[in-house]
Structure formats: structure tokens, C-alpha cells
Image (cartoon, coloured by chain):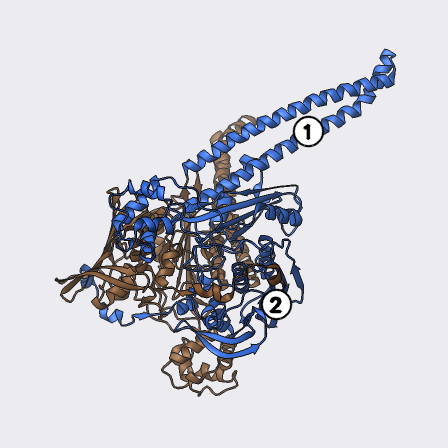
Chain colours: A blue, B brown
Amino acid sequence: MAAKKEMDDERSADDLFKEFKEVSITEFFRKNKAHLGYSGKLRSLTTVVHELVTNALDACEEAGILPELELKLKQLGTEHYSYTIRDNGPGIPQKHISSVFGKMLAGTKFHRNVQLRGQQGIGVAGVTLFSQMTTGRPVRIMTGTGDGKVVNIKLMVDVTKNEAEIIETKILTQNWRGTEIEGELKGVLFNLGERSPYEYIRRSAIANPHLTISFLDPEGRKSVFNRTSKEVPKRPTEMNPHPKGMDTDELLNMSKRTSARRVSGFLETDFSRISKAKTSEIQSHVNFDLKKNPRKLTWAEAEEITAAFETVDFMAPPVEGLTPIGAKQIENTIIKILKPEFQTIIERKPTVYGGGVPFQVEAAIAFGGNAGRRTSGEGVKVEVMRFANKTPLLFDYGGCALSQAVSSIEWKRYGMRDFDNSPITIVINLVSTHVPYTSAGKQSVSNDEAVQKELRMALMEMGRKFQRFHSRKRRLLEREERKNTLMKYSSELAIAVAKLSGKDEKMLIDSLQKLILAKLRLEDIVVEQEDIVVEQEDIFVEQEDIAVEEGT
Amino acid sequence: MAAKKEMDDERSADDLFKEFKEVSITEFFRKNKAHLGYSGKLRSLTTVVHELVTNALDACEEAGILPELELKLKQLGTEHYSYTIRDNGPGIPQKHISSVFGKMLAGTKFHRNVQLRGQQGIGVAGVTLFSQMTTGRPVRIMTGTGDGKVVNIKLMVDVTKNEAEIIETKILTQNWRGTEIEGELKGVLFNLGERSPYEYIRRSAIANPHLTISFLDPEGRKSVFNRTSKEVPKRPTEMNPHPKGMDTDELLNMSKRTSARRVSGFLETDFSRISKAKTSEIQSHVNFDLKKNPRKLTWAEAEEITAAFETVDFMAPPVEGLTPIGAKQIENTIIKILKPEFQTIIERKPTVYGGGVPFQVEAAIAFGGNAGRRTSGEGVKVEVMRFANKTPLLFDYGGCALSQAVSSIEWKRYGMRDFDNSPITIVINLVSTHVPYTSAGKQSVSNDEAVQKELRMALMEMGRKFQRFHSRKRRLLEREERKNTLMKYSSELAIAVAKLSGKDEKMLIDSLQKLILAKLRLEDIVVEQEDIVVEQEDIFVEQEDIAVEEGT
């Protein structure tokens, strides 16, 4: 109240709250388009490509179709482009088209614990929004599910209502299956740089060996990335959450939605890795009867259950639901593209982070050959390729848990003296039924402890492998040099000795070289023994690394 | 269709879309709480403090009240805390309490072009959500507007409806004005580190000299930051957008909402810096009559207008609407807290970024004294304090435009050899009627070109000022050293010369020292001339800097 006296003209609460209003989610993102990745002329264009490609890939993967995409970007004027993307996916039922493209927070992915690229039901509607915001024009969608009719729709978003506004609908009788999306953008710019649509597509091809995609860029170049594998990735299956790390709020939410009539049944059917045996183990940790109706579960009781989850042992989360790229696939692509001198791939076991969400880290490191990022002027820098659910992350490097893990490693420990300026490419892919992105733009992963630990473990393991390769290489080089010198001088030596001793020169050379080779064989053994030592050191380092992690 | 043959068991579109659902914004943020800054035990706690403090400050500032806040954090168990914040703000009218604390995308700030800390209508409801997600408990709000009744409400958020669920309401007859919020959190952790609630409050005090805030931390320490200025910051006034950089979509939106009956009137009343004269100038650039009804404006016509905006000259955006901290205030705090050897403060002129949004950059650099960040072991590192609308930004350093501007500067050019390891503190505050944050967590600013340019200009100008201080200091030191050496030897010299020449020693010393001082006076003049040279170089560097920017 002291303040009141000091003040001459305060405004009352009622006065201030005259302005009170509600806004729609679309209006919110229209005003905060940077949240969706629409900031900057280059990034905005790449974001559009990102949303269109990931959506097509998800559709194909869910339908079990080998994806074939055609993307076209055409320049219509200064900072004015059109985009067209065509896929061979399952198509979209007519009654859903308007919500998919014209409504935010609506989709098929949000409620399911399934590994997909999209998870929010915002991205594609965001493309419609950004297109109309910059050009005032609708997007055109042509889609067929193979049932003999192809639907053509032009629509815009009614921002205040968060609803599609259908401008035009045409139905053709044609037995085509797939989807084609076309629209225009202004205030964007195309280039071939590190964060361009081209790079986005190149990396998508790297992480999706079963993908065939062609890209016609605004300067008329056509790039085709053919699939290197005809294998359809196993369809992403829904996974029940794992009890470890489950939080009470989520458990309570699930208990309201379950079809089970008893808490015990609820636990056994709606979670992974909870058997009848485990339920009775849980029963022994809680002070109420698990025969209780799940809908009647209280917060306190739910808390008892999550507490029990932490003390009881469960099998690791099931693997089926997670579909990493796969060590073999990554290795093939790396060898094909980078032709490195050394590469190693690590696939960590699936585990969980907060809320019982399963995730898995796979990573690769390539050294030498075309690895690393060429800089203007002969230089080379380390290159880090980030992926989440096989989707390239090109932006927000600094704020991303994947990048932070890389820079948190003391690479010197693994024999990389000048890591930043080495011909090294690191590939990291985080797969999960729910990637904890830092923003709706989905270009950086938030720094969860469990995730960070898995990332570091993978990187450190690769570091140790590199170190072994590196030190062995060094020792073999040294040996080679010694051999050459010795052989070189053996003959001169022989001649000299022959002169002095009067013994036969030829004989001397032979015996000398025999001697040398014998010595070298001895050294080989030493080298091998050293290898064993190195491996022991290695195990030691590994234990240290693990200790470090336990520490964190 | 090729794919179809390869596949045995494809799933149809209708099958896939069985899962189609809509979710509420609260449900969205519940599942993506990292978007709101709820990731990690420490960050989550700081985020709660951030939302509560900024909200109280906004309320006081809008009401024209000198803010007095009391914040308490109490530990209730492991990773279990309670928070209480009390302000002397205007209070909240009863009928709005539930939307403020229990509904997202609802508030008084979204639609107005006014500089406030909050702008999204998400933050406080986010605190309610996070509290109930981690503890299952409601938040308690006590608020009075000074009209003789004080309302006590306990509420939670109904996640599926994005609506408040009132648990309890009590009305007391009492003539108190202010608001007190109380709640509980689990899975969070308190410390005193760089990103802790304590540091958040300390920096809030730095950027808000009119704020008095007391903080009782979980370990029982009470810190009080008393206001250093009794001046109520001028109330943030709404500003019409500036024509420069206005985009067509926004103009069209405004034209539908305007009360003006002609486009000409619409331009003059709904934009800043558009006079009658300017309207007729605009008329000469467009191919339709500005007497037209704004509601009938087409996209093409709106585009003509925005195009005209770019060719016509307008006065810089008005300053009244933007309330920076102020050079004087920043200087006082810096001198008080850091006691530096050198400091300089730059206040750039207000300008606009995309959408005609006015913004302004103020920055300060302090060198020596307590400037910089002390590291474990006597080391010191450069410290960058980021603020947006006087709110500290403690997280997402890497992805923030402010940090990127700092690391984009070649500090060597300005005589800072080892910038990263220097006793330097840089303060940057970006004020705007709409800060382009990268995510709803509002801890980093997205990299807009116009913003980036202003930031760099400010930093480079400070660099030049530092350089001048630095080189002058160096030259004076050199001179001082020379003087001391000369004086030291003058007497010895005199004695020697006296011996040789037989002249009077005393006399020799005098004349020698006269000589030296004369020489030094000469050097002073040289130093001053050098200063002039430096200043000329300085102007040269400045022109270079500007050239660099024009280049970008």
C-alpha cells in the first residue's frame, strides 16, 4: 500500500482486465511463427520442406509402403517460390483432409506411444498457415486412397477459429493412391548451404535407406537419391509405457482412460513388462488393494504405485516399438558416402526417460576419407549430423542435447588432439515414442538427464574404439619405418664388414637381414602384447567413463 | 503403385485415420512441458520462479505501482518444495482469476502492441499445470483489488478442456490490494548456481532498479534486494505498428478489425508515423483509390500498400512505447555491483523488425574489477547477461540471437586478445512490443536479421570504446615506465659526468632532470596526437563496421 501513496495515477485491476481475451492456437502460432521454425528466409523454406517430407515418410511407414517422393521448388519471383511434393503413401480420407491441413493440435499421432517423426499435429497445418501468411493463397491438396476417386481440395486456415476454410473441392474418378501438396511462399530464399532444403533431403536419404526421393531445385538441378535398401522398415508399433520413471500424473491419467476394471488388470494391460508376478510384488509395496477400480485411484495411491515401480525390477523396455536406422544400414551409408579410414557404429540398448518413455541412441563416428566438413580454404572441421526419429535436425545446434553431449566429451582422452579441426563425422540418431523437443519447431532435443547419459555413453564408447585404432596405427607405422631403415643400411653394413673380415658379402647380407627380420618378428609379438595392454587400459577407461556417468 | 506389389500387408488410409483426435492446448503442453521450460530439476524450479516474478512485475508496471515482492521457497521433502509469492500489485478481479491461472492462451497481453514481460497468456497457467502434474495438488490464490474484499481460491486445470476447475472459494472482507500465489512442486531441486532461482532474482533486481524483492530460500537464507530508484517506470503504452517491414498478412488482418471507414483513415489511425501527407504519397504508389472501405481490401491491394511502405520514408518508430532500463540506471548498477576499471553503455535508437514491430537494444560492457565470471580455481571467464524486456534469460544460451551476436564479433579487432578468458561482463537487453522468442519457454530470442544487426552494431560500438580506453591506458603505462627509468639513472649519470667533467654534481642532476621532463612533456603532446590518430582510426573502424553490416 506504501506504493499507493507515492503514485498519482494508478490503474485499477478492472480497468486493466478490460483487455482480457482468448486466442486460438493458430492465432498464437501466427504471432509466434518462430516457435514453428519460421524465422529467417532460408530456415523458413527448409522448415516447409521438413514438414512435408516427414509427413509423407510417416504416412508411408505406418501404411507399410516403400516411400517414393518427388519434391519440386520453383522460383516465381524475388523471394517468391512454389513447392510441390508428391508421395505414394496411403492417401487421406476426404473427411479428414480439412483437419490435417487446416487445424492445429489435431492428428493421428498425439495420443499414441508410437515412434513417428511427427507427434504434435501442428506441422502440416503450420505449412498451410505460413503459405497463406506470406502469399494470401490457399494450398492445393490432391489425394487418393486407391478407392477409385481422387479428391482435389484448395483450403486455407481460419486463424481465429483454428479451422480449415475450404475454397474449392473437385472429385475425379481415378484409381490413384498417394498425396500431392502444392503451395506458394514469399519472403523465403533458396540456397545449397549446410541448412538448405537440399542438405535436409540428403540427410533424410542417409537416415532412411529405404527412401527414394527426387528433388528438382529452383535452379533446375534434379537430384535423385535412390533407396539403398528395399526392406520396408518394420511398421512402428504402439508401446505401452514402461513402469520405470513413470510419473504419478501420467499414471493417474491412464487409470481414467483404461478399460480394465481393477488396478491390477490396468497395470498388466496398460504397461509393458508388468506380469501377474510383478503385480503381486507391487501389491506387497502398497497399502491398498490393487483389486480397486482404477477410476477411483487417488493421487496418494497412484504415488504409492509409482514409488513401488522404482523399487521393483522390470525387464528392459521392449525393442519392437523402436525402429532405429540400424548399425548395418548406417555403416553402409557411411562407407558409401564418406569412404573413411576408420568408422565405428554403436547401438545402445533401449531405455526410458521421465514418464516411462522408451528411447534408444545409435551413433557412428567416421575418421579420414571424406569425413568432416570442408571449410573455405583447405581446412576441415568436425561435422555432427543430428537425427531424431530418423529426421535430420539442421537448426538450433547450440541448444540441443545431442550437440551438448558431443561437446561435453573430453576427446583428448581418446587420442583426438584437435577434435574441432579433425576430419571426423559424427552421426547421432535418437529414437523414441516421444522425443522431448525444446519447441514446436522440433529442431533441438531438451536436455533430459537419462537421455544425456545414454548419448555420452555411446560417444565415449566410440571414443575408446577410435583410440584403439589410432594407437595401433601409430605403432605399426613406427615399426614399418624401423624396418625400412634397418634393411636400407644392412647391405652397406655387409659390404663394409666383408671388406674388413674378408668374409663373403652375399652371405653376410643374408644373415644380417635374417637377423633383422627375426628382431622384427620379436617386435610383432611385443606389438601384440601392447595391443593386449591397450585393451586392458581400454577396459579401465571404460570403467572410469561409467564411473563418471554414475557421478553425474 | 510399384510399392503396392512389393507389400504384403499394407494398411489403408481409413484404417490409419481411425486414430484421428483433437487435443487441447493444455494437453499439448502437458505432454511437451519442455516447450515451457519444464525440463530438468533445476530449470523447472527456476521456470516457476520466472513466471511468477515476471507476472507480478507486469501487473505492477501496468498499474503504475512500485513493485514489492516477497518470494518464499520451502523444502517439504526430497525434491519436494512449496513456493509462495506475494506482490503489492493491482490484484485480479474475481471473475478473471480462473482464466488467468487455469486457462492457456487467455490473457490481457496477446492482442496489444505493448512492451510487457509476458505476451502469450501461457506462463502462469503453466505453473498451475506443472504444480498439479508433479504433486496432484491445486494452487491457492489470494487476491484483492482494494475494493474491501479479498478472494481466496484453490484451483486446478482441467487438462482436456483447458479450463480451470475451482476447488474452493472463500471471500474475506478486508481492504488489501495485491496477489499471493502458493503451490507445491515435486521432482525439482534448489541450488545457488548460475541458473538458480537466486541468480534469476539477482538479475531481475539488476534490470529493474525500481523493484524491491525479498527471497527466503529453502536453506533459510533471506536475501533482500532493495530498489535503487524510486522512479516508477513510465507505464508501457500501446504502439501502433510502424509501416516499415509491415507484412501483408498482418496489414490485411488489421484492415478487418479497424474502425476507420476508408483505407486512408485506416493507415493514418492504425499505424504510427503515417500522416495525411504520407497517405497521399502512398496513394501515388498504388493503383487503387485509398478512399476504399478497408474491409474490402484485397490481398493484391494490401501487397501494393506494403510495397509502397518500403519506398516511402517514415520517421523512426516512436520511443514512448518502449521502456528500456536506461543508460544511467545500467551504469549505476554496474558500478555498484562490479566496480569495474572501465565500463560503457550503448543505447541504440528504436527500430523495427518484420511485421513493423518496434524494438530497441541497450547494452553495456564492464572490464576489470569484479567483472566476468569467476571459475573454480582462480580463473575468470567472460560473462554475458541476457535480458529481454528486462527479464533475465538464463537458459538456451546457445540458440539465442543475443549470445550469437556476442560470439559473432571479432573481439581481437578491439584489442581483446583472449576475450573468452577476460574479466568482462556484457549486459544486453532487448526491448520490444513483441520479442520473437524461439519457444514458449521464452529463454532465447530467434535470430531475426534486423535484430541481429542492431545487436552487432551495439557490441561493435562498445568494442571501439573499449579499444580507445585500452590503447590510451597502454601508452600511459609505457610513458610512466620510461619516466621512472630515466629519473632513476639521471642521478647516477650526473655523478659520473661530474667526475669526468669536474662540473658541479647538483647542477648536473637538475639540468638532466629538466631535460628529461622536457622530453616527457614532448611525449605527452605526442600521446595526445596519438589519441587524435586513434580517434581517427576509430572513425575508420566504425565505418568499416557499418560497411560490414550493410554487407550482411
Q: Quadrant of the C terminus of chain B?
A: bottom right
Residue drawn at (32%, 67%) of the image: B106
Percent across and percent down for residue B313 are 49, 76
- Other-residue count near label 2 (Cα within 10 Å), few / some / many at <14 / 14–19 / ≥20: some
The chain carrying label 2 is: A
**Residue A346 visible, this angle:** yes
The amino acid on which the numbered mark 2 sits, given as a three-letter code, is Lys
Q: In this orientation, which residue lies closer to the viewer: B470 or B67?
A: B67
The chain carrying label 1 is: A
Q: Secondary structure at mark 2?
A: strand
Disc on res. A72: 2
Q: Which residue is mark 1?
A: A478
**Residue B232 visible, this angle:** no
Q: In this orientation, which residue lies closer to the viewer: B438 or A511?
A: A511
> From mark 2 to mark 1, how far is it between C-alphas?
54 Å
- Other-residue count near label 1 (Cα within 10 Å), few / some / many at <14 / 14–19 / ≥20: few
Q: Secondary structure at mark 1?
A: helix
